Image (spheres, grey):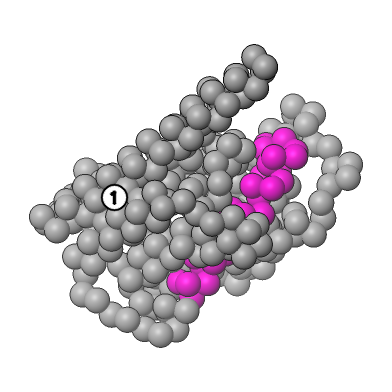
Amino acid sequence: MKGKLSPLLIILAAILWGTTGTAQALAPENAHPIAIGATRLAVGGIFLLVIVLIRGQLNVKDWPIKTTILAALSMALYQPLFFSAVTITGVAIGTVVAIGSAPILSGLLEWIFLKTHPAKVWWLSTFLSIIGCLMLFLNKESVYVDPVGIVLALGAGLSFACYTLVSRDMVQKYSSLSVIAVVFTLSAICLSPFLFVFDMSWIMSLRGVGVSLQLGIMATGVAYFLFAKGLVHVSSSTAVTLALIEPLTATLLGVFLLEETLNRTSWFGIFLLLLGIGILIWSSKNSSSQNENKKSKIASL
């Protein structure tokens, strides 16, 4: 049963991630995107660490230091790379390259390091989802391709793919809550210098506090906890593809809350994105059912 719910947990996490764009749009005007990203990790890391300490689940005995540092650096790098890419080459291209490249890069990393080749259904669903994202975003603004922005966006996609691959190995051996608490606390420490570089006066306003708490607690703490729980029973490549529901959430929130409009191409992109995600969920449930049947047959023998 837990394995069947794992894709849904990842989708819920992606929905929460999808609120970040709307939250940033509602942030004070003097809030720099990188400063918002650093604040997000700081609030999220502190929130998770406090929860773990209250529940007494922090056990660092035999903790994999190298793996933890790699996961923390991957998450810390993702924030400035993504926000810088979006600033340089625009929201459309930056988001499509970063989020769209992550599933492919994740599949390649699994192939190289884990020697596992993604199934054909994964390639089909990932292709449909990425094309859907492309159609969804490229109609929002004029296309401007900047080589530096593309490289930064690819770096963001690789960072998220690395984080997913590394953290999946950790959550299978340790408590999911403990893993993300430690990783995000270290990531927040890595990005803490940005809090002194940019103007942080915005965080003292009522709107600034609200945005920081929403991004830190809901879009980071709760979201990545759900993502980590889902990773226990889902491969990293599948998880990253399911996470493509994030731009769909961001788009729909923009329509209903920020009064943005979508044309027919964008709506068709939403259809392809949902079709790709649906195929992946269907295949994941089938594989889980097959595994349970195999286990029951073995047990009966």
Which is more toward the observer, 258 or 262?
A: 262
For the view shown, which residue lies furthest in the right direction? 61
Q: Over which residues does the magenta segment extend?
A: 152-180
Looking at the image, is 110 positioned above or below residue 156? Answer: above
Q: Residue at x 47, y 72 (%)?
A: 154
How many labels, in total? 1
Q: Position of residue 73 (x, y in %)?
A: 67, 63
Looking at the image, is 275 positioned above or below residue 292? Answer: below
Q: Residue at x 28, y 60 (%)?
A: 131
Q: Position of residue 161 (x, y in %)?
A: 55, 59
Majority secondary structure of the magenta segment?
Answer: helix
| Badge 1 density bin: few <14, some 14–19, many ≥20, Cα 10 Å | many
**Residue type for callout 1:** Leu
The residue tagged with tag 1: helix, strand or loop?
helix
In the rendered structure, does residue 156 fall within the stretch colored magenta?
Answer: yes
Pointer 1 residue: 273
Q: Position of residue 289 (x, y in %)?
A: 49, 27
